Amino acid sequence: MIFRRTAVLAVAASALCAADAFSPGGRSSPSREALPLRSAPPASAVTSASPAAVAPAASGLVPPVDPSDPAVIADMQSKFETFVYKTYGRYPITITSGKGCVLTGADGKEYLDFVAGIATCALGHGHAGLSAAVSSQIGRLHHVSNLYLIPEQAALAEWLVSNSVGDKAFFANSGAEANEGAIKLARRHASDRGITDPVIITAVDSFHGRTLAAVTATGQPKYHRGFTYGGKMVEGFEYVPYNDVQALEDLVKKIEKTPLRHRLQGRKRGVAAIMMEPLQGEGGIIPGTTAFFDAARSLCDATGALLVCDEVQAGMGRTGKLWGYENVGATPDVFTTAKALGGGVPIGAMVARGQAADVLGPGDHASTYGGNPLACAAALAVARAFSEDDLLTNINARGDQLAVARAFSE
């Protein structure tokens, strides 16, 4: 769709995007009455939270504090207690910088980073290539939405497809969103096969994300407490013990039989997907077995279901191969990735092959930020490092070192 320039400028102005719209003598200069903004908080509210708080600016808004200000850093614990939702159990450590595998706290103390931002910082901290890619991209074009062709997104999709079993990629902002996309794809694929009651099989002690469908797919009741409706999470998920071939076969057989009362209502039950991590993380660092994934592949082929591999943690080299499914000899129809894909910059992807790559069409699924130029530029820098610096060889060498150390300690 082509918009005339005047229309684009009008939309930009109405969205308050034109910087000179509010400047003295600017083209628009709307009156204060035209702006339904909240009144500025009283001065007491502004200054009581911390010694570094500042008074309202000329706009009437309270400007942000400088997070690098020593006074602000010294008051960090208080700020988190006052302003940040308490959904994390945080250590009382304020990290202010990092280089390679070393993090530095506000007190100057250094830490060897074994967490890597929870499996995201594949290139470490302050990586020259990643820093340059992000800096260059944000100075050129950081976001335009998926209404247009994005060169960085196309290049990243090509790299993912060229280095996997996939044919097409969809981009999101996180692993949970990538898994939500896979869940929707599996349900639509089942619907196209005439299944009205699609069931996705996941593993006990699995972890697939925190959004409602993804946390339902997560086979851990502790994450379900308080989020049910009538005692139920999102319907259409069943769980089997990880690596238990017999349990998987029995459950598939059960699901494929639609109860009579449902058949009389014109309903049909069936397996939409078997969704598994090639290596369980929260489940206890348990590698999948070839026998289990062979069975999953055969059952999907027999029923028309999709085999989905959640590579959010195991993917991008963490198992010594680029993708975890390579270790178990599986060929998934769909796999998801995130975390290390952006090297610490938020991005997720759902990659599909064959028929699964053609299930979703325009309007069926979307993401405002998914695959934007900035996130994809970061992921491309990570991709170049894997391709040109042979990171997988280094990963395996470090793994061998840890194995020797573990054997020595035992």
Image (cartoon, grey):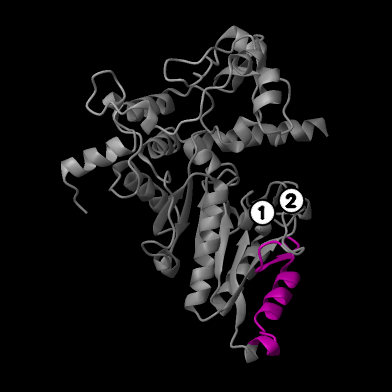
Front-most of residues 101 and 171: 171
Whether tag 2 and tag 1 are in contact, CB under 8 A, the answer is yes
* Label annotation for residue 223: 2
* Residue type pointed to by label 2: Tyr
Horizontally, residue 267 falls left or right of residue 23, namely: right
* Residue that lies at the very extreme toward the right in this rendered image: 410
Residue range of the region highlighted in magenta in the rendering: 233-262
Does 367 appear above or below 403? below
Horizontally, residue 58 falls left or right of residue 17, namely: right
In the rendered image, residue 313, in percent from the top left (x then y), is placed at: 60, 45
Circle 2: element type: helix
* Residue type pointed to by label 1: Val
* Label annotation for residue 215: 1
Separation (CA) of disc 2 from disc 1:
7 Å
Residue 236 lies in the magenta-colored region:
yes
Does 369 appear above or below 71? below
Horizontally, residue 193 falls left or right of residue 233, namely: left
Front-most of residues 64 and 225: 64
In the rendered image, residue 312, in percent from the top left (x then y), is placed at: 57, 47
* Label annotation for residue 154: none
In the rendered image, residue 381, in percent from the top left (x then y), is placed at: 40, 34
Q: Residue at x 64, y 48 (%)?
A: 210
In the rendered image, residue 351, in percent from the top left (x then y), is placed at: 46, 56
From where the camera sits, is residue 131 visible? yes
